[in-house]
Amino acid sequence: MRLQTRIVVLFLALMLAIQLAGFAIIRAGIQQNARTEIGTQLAAGERVLDRLLAQSAQKLTQGARLLAADYGFREALASDDRETIGSALGNHSGRIGATLALLYGLDGAERARSAVPSLAQADAATGAWINRLIAQAERDGDAAGTRVIDGRLHQVVVVPVKAPIPIAWVAMGFAVDEELARDLRQLSLLHVSFVDRRDGRHTVLGSTLSEAARAALAQQAPDIAFPSAALGELELVGESFGMRVHPVGAGQTGAATFAVLQRSIEEAIAPYRRLQLTLLLLTAFGLAASVLGSVLTARRITRPVLDLVNGARLLARGDYSVRVQVPQRDEIGQLASAFNQMSEGLSVRERQITRLAYWDTLTGLPNRVQFVDKLREALERNRKQERMCSVLMMDLDRFKVVNDVLGHQIGDVLLREAAERLMIGLAGRTDLIARLGGDEFAVLLEGESPEAAVQWGRSILLALEAPFSVQGQTVDLRASIGIAGYPAHGTEGTLLLSRAEVAMYTSKSRNAGILVYDPRFDENSQRNLSLMTELKQAIEQNQFVLLYQPKVHIASGEVWGGEALIRWAHPQRGFVPPDRFIPFAEQTGFIRDITRWVLRQAVTQCAAWRARGHAWSIAVNLSTRDLMDLELPQWLGELLQAHGVPPAAIGLEITESAIMEDPARALQTLELLDGMGFGLSIDDFGTGYSSLAYLKRLPIQELKIDKSFVMSLNRDADDAIIVRATVDLAHNLGVKVVAEGVESAEIWSMLRALGCDLGQGYHLSKPVRPEEFERWAMHGYSEAAA
Ligand code: C2E
Ligand code: CA
Ligand code: CA
């Protein structure tokens, strides 16, 4: 049952019970009251009846006395003038309205009677009864009595006719019936009936009751306890009466007359009926009012409760804007305000959760979840408009190393900075830019073909080129970019994203900078997965080979030694160039194992040559990771000692960018290696951003000008200027200069003219196996031979 209904029903039931109880109590009170009143009225009526009877007896007595004193009457008695006697009886009785007038002689015999028409005859029994009254009057002066005579109840008085002694007796009587009863009823509101009992039969002689009631009374009379002064109740023709029985005359034996006084209970209650009706109306009004009141109260309670229920449903559906308006200040009002606070709290928390779920807190950019969502929406849009778009994914190179080495705090700063550069590179394009996680960023370029996206990629890489400066340190951050285009490379967001990722990883492993997705990359990336295990196998199964490329003093043609360059002879794939696995090994950290393998190989080779009297040095390439490997210097020292090779016979080539990734740390390692006596060389010089002023602080003996400047030295005037400037500056710093990528005799002689110290390149020899190197170096370099 609904709460509202329950409240209303409860209120109603209570109200009804109270009203009914009140009604019943009042009704009982009224009945009680009416009965008491009826009792009083009946008692009073009894007295009035006695009084009326007494009055009429007095009236009769006076009338009879007047007659007895009448001179003419007495004359007539004396003379026994029957006619006069008769008329005197008639006159006197007629004057007072008596219905019976008789004259008795002293002997007790009737001498005359009036010509009262109603009186038919006085029987013998009546004569005897009158004689008894006469006997009483002889004693008391007069006598009165009541008796049914000729079918009617009579009140009869007897007085003597004195002359001066009694000479006769006059009996005079009234019929006590309807009239008296009516008088009584008028005076007392009571019904009165005269009942005569004779020989066990009851006759109603006169009554104010209706004919039917009269008959009913006669019928019930045997059950009424006569005579009784007690109060009783009587039901006649469907009406209830309070009743009292009053004896009015005793007749001959076995006969008696009673007045039955009745008061209608209904009549007595009638005045209260109005009161009851008023009360009933009041009850009805009270009920109506309580229904209204309870409905209103229930509404007051249930309306806000329903509002709260609806509010809770909306909340459950995720609508946190719901507020329940309850003006009340009671508990329900408090509940509503608590509910509103809850809703508010939920919405705040939801906003926070959404922020965490859809935004990257570090850079303030959207995160992967949001990017994927928005990408799906954008593709939907572009599908309808038949527009192209491109997904660009960018990953910082070697960021993991930077993060590990410099600490996460600086890593975070760098990531924020990288995000800003990314936006600079996009030149204010309001495209969707997201940080997917780690050092991975993604950009959605709407309306751009993959080819156009490549231009944007270039712009981003350009923005990243300037070194980052964090807490006084300069850090070089490079990035690899992969691009996938809609609809050429996929029509679904997640597919496009994963293809951009494949392109990005391929670009990274190839050091390509930017690559647009190509289905062949998938195979590559598949291959990359197995590359790691294969690299491990390569060392175990001796698949690596170390070749040596001569480094020669330009001025003298004397062989300094050779640069060790690794080769991988893969059993299935065949020859794998170092560019295809060195960057991968650097990313995964496997370069550590490769470097140690190369060093072991090179030192062994160096020892072998030295044993045969060749004092050739060997240059080995080191990667960024190797500079972070704090155990390397000691390991290398032990290795040299084991083979009896002096550190000066080993040159270490480190690329400029490897140093710039973590200059402080690099400096530390370089100083350590320098202290141990190794010759240190800056490789690929000119491709990075390190200034010579900075390099001055490094403990290096050699600069290796990148082959890109050397190879076109004979064709490009700028390259010549760069080489010349580098040579001059290096010499000023007391550092030797090596040119790699010497492909022709022309370049060789130009380098000599520029004062370059050492040369290396295909013009002299390609990287070759140690036996071949030995053969080549034994003859030394002669321009004629080359
Ligand atoms: P790099 O250290 O700059 O090595 C020189 C590269 O230039 C070698 O390529 C060599 O074959 C090539 N080269 C020599 N003379 C000429 C020339 O006259 N013209 C042209 N066009 N190229 C010439 P390679 O052997 O393919 O090695 C590529 C890169 O792989 C190396 O560049 C180096 O960075 C890396 N690498 C090779 N071996 C190792 C290694 O053992 N350890 C480490 N960490 N990196 C290695
Ligand atoms: Ca090198
Ligand atoms: Ca180089």
Image (spheres, rainbow, N blue to C red):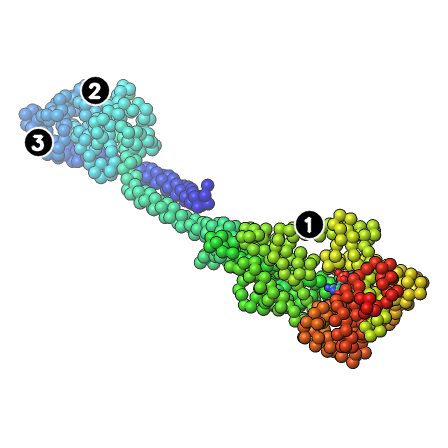
Real-space Cα distance between discs 1 and 3? 158 Å
Q: Amino acid at mark 3?
A: Asn
Mark 1 or mark 3: which comes first in sequence? Answer: 3
Q: Are marks 2 and 3 in contact (CB under 8 Å)?
A: no
Identify the element where label 2 is drawn.
helix
State the quadrant of the C terminus: bottom right
Q: Amino acid at mark 1?
A: Gln
**x%, y% of residue 77?**
9, 27
Q: Is residue 596 above or below residue 554?
A: above
Question: Which residue corresponds to mark 1?
Answer: 526
Q: Is mark 1 within 8 Å of ligand 1?
A: no
Q: Toward which corner of the image does residue 452 lie, by quadrant?
A: bottom right
Q: Nearer the viewer, residue 728 or 645?
A: 728
Disc 3 crowd, CA 10 A, few/some/many (<14, 14-19, 20+): some
Q: Nearer the viewer, residue 719 or 310?
A: 719
Real-space Cα distance between discs 2 and 1? 152 Å
Residue at image x 37%, y 45%?
A: 287
Real-space Cα distance between discs 2 and 3? 26 Å
Q: Is residue 698 above or below residue 503?
A: below
Foreground disc of the pair 1, 3: 1
Identify the element where label 3 is drawn.
helix
**x%, y% of residue 353?**
58, 57
Q: Toward which corner of the image does residue 406 lie, by quadrant?
A: bottom right
**x%, y% of residue 263?**
28, 35
Mark 2 or mark 3: which comes first in sequence? Answer: 3
Disc 1 crowd, CA 10 A, few/some/many (<14, 14-19, 20+): few
Q: Which mark is residue 91?
A: 3
Residue at image x 77%, y 71%?
A: 748
Question: Which residue corresponds to mark 2?
Answer: 125
Q: Nearer the viewer, residue 676 or 381?
A: 676
Q: Nearer the viewer, residue 495 or 509?
A: 509
Identify the element where label 1 is drawn.
helix
